[in-house]
């Protein structure tokens, strides 16, 4: 009888310990994909290139779908993309004022930016990628500001957002 009580007590203690433990937030499964969309419409903040993300409307179809992202280099901020996506970007009519895009993860807006060609003489204090770089490779380097860094200008940097990294890591597409 005593032995049954001891065993029942041990089982009850272990059961309470297991069910009382908090679930780790990091243990929830990673869902969704990363995609690049062109913007249907948006507004900028004042006389800057900064896109007011509360005004963003994205196009219906992704320009670069998740299956067309081959990898993401989180140290260099470079997306390697498929030939199909490379051609789709090259086929756009690129403006010296840029073409706005959004990076989405699991259908949530993570950040916005512009395809900003290197032949533009205009300055852009926002997230940019040079579409002309696709002439040499399948790599899109995501940068802060064009033509380069600027003292005193602060641009929110979500290029290595946790959700983006987790999705690419989940599928072995993250280069760290």
Image: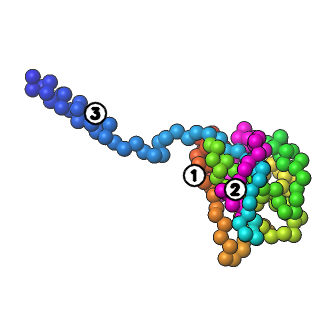
Q: Residue at x 85, y 44 (%)?
A: 88
The residue segment tinted magenta is: 50-77
Examine the structure image and report whether residue 157 is included in the region drawn in magenta: no
Of the two numbered discs 2 and 1 on the same chain, state the one appearing first in sequence: 2
Question: In the rendering, at what x and y percent does residue 154 appear?
Answer: 65, 70
Of the two numbered discs 2 and 3 on the same chain, state the one appearing first in sequence: 3
Label 2: few (<14), some (14–19) or many (≥20) C-alpha neighbours in 10 Å: few
Q: What quarter of the picture does the N terminus occupy?
A: top left
Is 46 situated left or right of 22 in this image? right
* Circle 2/circle 3 CB separation < 8 Å: no
Q: Which residue was labeled with disc 3?
A: 15
Is 17 situated left or right of 56 in this image? left
Is 25 situated left or right of 81 in this image? left
The residue furthest bottom is 151
Q: Quadrant of residue 122?
A: bottom right
Q: Which residue was labeled with disc 1?
A: 162
Q: Residue at x 73, y 48 (%)?
A: 58
Of the two numbered discs 3 and 1 on the same chain, state the one appearing first in sequence: 3
Q: Is residue 174 visible?
A: no
Foreground of the two, 158 or 57: 57
Q: Which residue was labeled with disc 2?
A: 55
Question: In the rendering, at what x and y percent does residue 93 appear?
Answer: 90, 53
Residue 10 to residue 20: above or below? above
Foreground of the two, 46 or 121: 46
């Amino acid at each position: 009888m005593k032995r049954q009580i001891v065993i029942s007590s041990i089982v009850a203690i272990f059961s309470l310990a297991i069910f009382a433990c908090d679930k780790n937030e990091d243990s929830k499964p990673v869902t969704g994909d990363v995609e690049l969309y062109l913007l249907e419409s948006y507004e900028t903040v004042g006389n800057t290139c900064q896109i007011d993300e509360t005004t963003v409307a994205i196009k219906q179809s992704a320009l670069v779908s998740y299956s067309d992202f081959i990898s993401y280099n989180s140290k260099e901020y470079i997306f390697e993309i498929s030939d199909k996506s490379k051609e789709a970007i090259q086929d756009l009519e690129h403006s010296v004022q840029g073409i706005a895009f959004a990076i989405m993860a699991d259908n949530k807006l993570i950040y916005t930016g512009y395809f900003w060609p290197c032949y533009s003489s205009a300055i852009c204090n926002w997230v940019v990628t040079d579409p002309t770089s696709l002439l040499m490779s399948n790599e899109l380097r995501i940068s802060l500001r064009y033509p380069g860094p600027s003292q005193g200008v602060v641009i929110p940097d979500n290029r290595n957002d946790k959700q983006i990294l987790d999705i690419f890591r989940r599928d072995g597409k993250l280069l760290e």
